[in-house]
Image (cartoon, coloured by chain):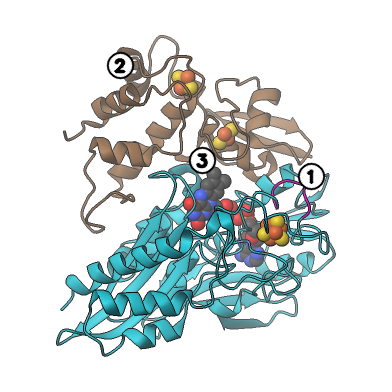
Chain colours: A cyan, B brown
Amino acid sequence: MRAFDYQRPESAEAATRAQSGAEARFIAGGTNLLDLMKLEIETPRTLIDISRLPLDGIAPTEAGGFSIGALVTNAALAADPSVRRLYPVLSRALLAGASGQLRNKATTGGNLLQRTRCYYFYNPATPCNKREPGSGCSAIGGHTRIHAILGTSPHCIATHPSDMAVAMMALEAEVEILGPDGQTRTIPLADLYRLPGDTPHIETSLAPGDLITAVILPPPPPGRQLYRKVRDRASYAFALVSVAAIIAMENGRISAARLAFGGLAPMPWRDREVEALLIGEAPSPALFAAAADRLLATARTEDGNAFKSPLARRTLASVLATACAGNS
Amino acid sequence: MHVTLSVNGTEHALDIDPRTTLLDALRDHLDLTGTKKGCDHGQCGACTILLDGKRINSCLTLAVMHEGDAITTVEGLSTPDALSPLQAAFVAHDGYQCGYCTPGQICSATGMLEEIAAGWPSHVTDDLEADPALTREEISERMSGNLCRCSAYPNIVDAIAEVGGAAK
Ligand SMILES: Cc1cc2nc3c(=O)[nH]c(=O)nc-3n(C[C@H](O)[C@H](O)[C@H](O)COP(=O)(O)OP(=O)(O)OC[C@H]3O[C@@H](n4cnc5c(N)ncnc54)[C@H](O)[C@@H]3O)c2cc1C
Ligand code: SF4
Ligand code: FES
Ligand code: FES
């Protein structure tokens, strides 16, 4: 691990000012950042410990939703009684991720900003455009079992590994950000992430010094909420494919649908065209197949991840069948 | 850098490099070698300790971040003459072979039983709003962050089930 200066600012404002300097990183739970610092993939000169800032509350909002402090742990969020009752897709996604120990440390903000698990990104001996811009992508033409098939570019095919963010995408969460100028702004979660394009090292729309202070959940949408995760072992493994679904039915027809996908793309993936195609229709295998066709219309696969197309297709069909059945 | 760690009820003033993980501080600076280093990357659970009563991986946190926090290691769960209920159950059920993962298993199980008592659900809990039952399936899922290369899993689950008063 490279040497760094350790700082523990007393306030969120002081933290953003400290981080806006060069090569500084916030540390919250540390479960992703320290992993990468040990491998010298992250080499901050200054480490700003935000773990003791008072951003660890879950509070109702005036709009009827909830504000989740950036430092609420993944364990506390999953176990929160309101979240379990009103946003079960979020509890389920969190509980499907990592381990009991990791969830006790991992935070809401850190989970959103965790970096890819691409094997080549993790191996400093191999070229990687995300780690070293311009050096090339070792995954393309290499081992790609965990890689993305949607939203990729010829420069990077890494996935975003979070489960929590997939559920939050379906819930239309917003991210509250405090900048070093002292101003707070709120953006849709979808606008936090950037697709790789030709700059895969730029992963978010955050500027230096921007501190995530909270995630805002709107009031729970109508319908049944489900999270399904398919992985290489039954527990403690990242998703190959995951689906967050919120489906409402009226008179035997789908009246509202929100779908978000993990394991398929560089960010939690939502495709409104897929949702639009379902709304107003009666559930059927043919409809679910048409939804999968739409989802995968732009898929680009490698040898190692081509299996994700049929896997996503079957997982989507199964989730939709379950969501519609329990729900008429 | 100066930091004072409170470990198993005793305060220790240390002067350490800020890069020192909590795991290395415990093992190399405080000679508390019960806590083990397996992977050093959050993947095995051998380094599990209790931080303010919650189980965490001590390899993925820095010692300087834990000034004043109550840290409990396997050495703090008992004395050599009076084992904790989980320690005694691991002995009675042969919940290990080489024993390398055992301190992490026992600290993790100690924290896990508290989580069940607090009503926290898991990935395999059917009803998110009901109090979870301590079935074998629940124990396995909740303990999935602790790997055992010797694969003593059935006996580990037996030991935890006995202490937790598991439903069959
Ligand atoms: C073995 C293992 C298995 C895992 N399995 C899963 C899994 O199955 N599913 C899953 O979703 N995740 C999984 N994870 C990842 C885990 O969820 C993340 O490591 C964790 O959520 C990161 O949160 P943290 O608070 O520890 O972040 P940190 O490591 O502290 O920070 C991560 C990044 O976010 C930045 N950051 C943190 N907080 C803020 C903030 N408030 N504002 C701005 N920037 C911030 C940091 O600067 C850093 O760049 C796994 C991790 C491990 C080690
Ligand atoms: S997929 Fe992205 S992260 Fe992986 S090697 Fe290619 S550029 Fe790097
Ligand atoms: S040594 Fe910490 S999890 Fe393996
Ligand atoms: S007893 Fe040997 S690793 Fe578990």
Q: Residue at x 45, y 76 (%)?
A: A295
Q: In the image shown, does A144 or A57 lie closer to the viewer? A: A144
- For label 2, the residue is B93
Query: Please, what is the three-letter code of the amino acid marked with disc 2?
Result: His
Amino acid under label 3?
Ile
> Dividing the picture into quarters, in which one does residue A191 lie?
bottom right
Q: Which residue is label 1 attached to? A: A125
Q: Is mark 3 on a helix, strand or loop?
A: strand
In three-dimensional space, the C-alpha distance between marks 2 and 1, rounded to whole angstroms, equals: 45 Å
Left or right of residue A37, residue B102 in this image: left
Quarter occupied by the C terminus of chain B: top left
Q: Which class describes the residues within 10 Å of circle 1: few (<14), some (14-19), or many (20+)?
A: few
Q: Residue at x 42, y 27 (%)?
A: B106
Q: Mark 3 points at which residue?
A: B56
Q: Where is residue B37 in the image (x, y as percent from the top left)?
A: 60, 28
Q: Is the CB–ligand 4 distance for label 2 below 8 Å?
A: no
Residues at marks 1 and 3 on the same chain: no
Tell me the chief SS of the magenta region.
Answer: loop
- State which chain disc 2 sits on: B
Q: Position of residue A113 (x, y in %)?
A: 61, 63
| Amino acid type indicated by mark 1 | Ala
- Which image quadrant is residue B97 in? top left
Q: Which of marks 1 and 3 is in front?
A: 1
Q: Give the range drawn in magenta.
A: A121-127
Residue A244's x, y, as percent? 38, 68
Q: What element carries label 2?
A: loop
For the N terminus of chain B, the quadrant is top right
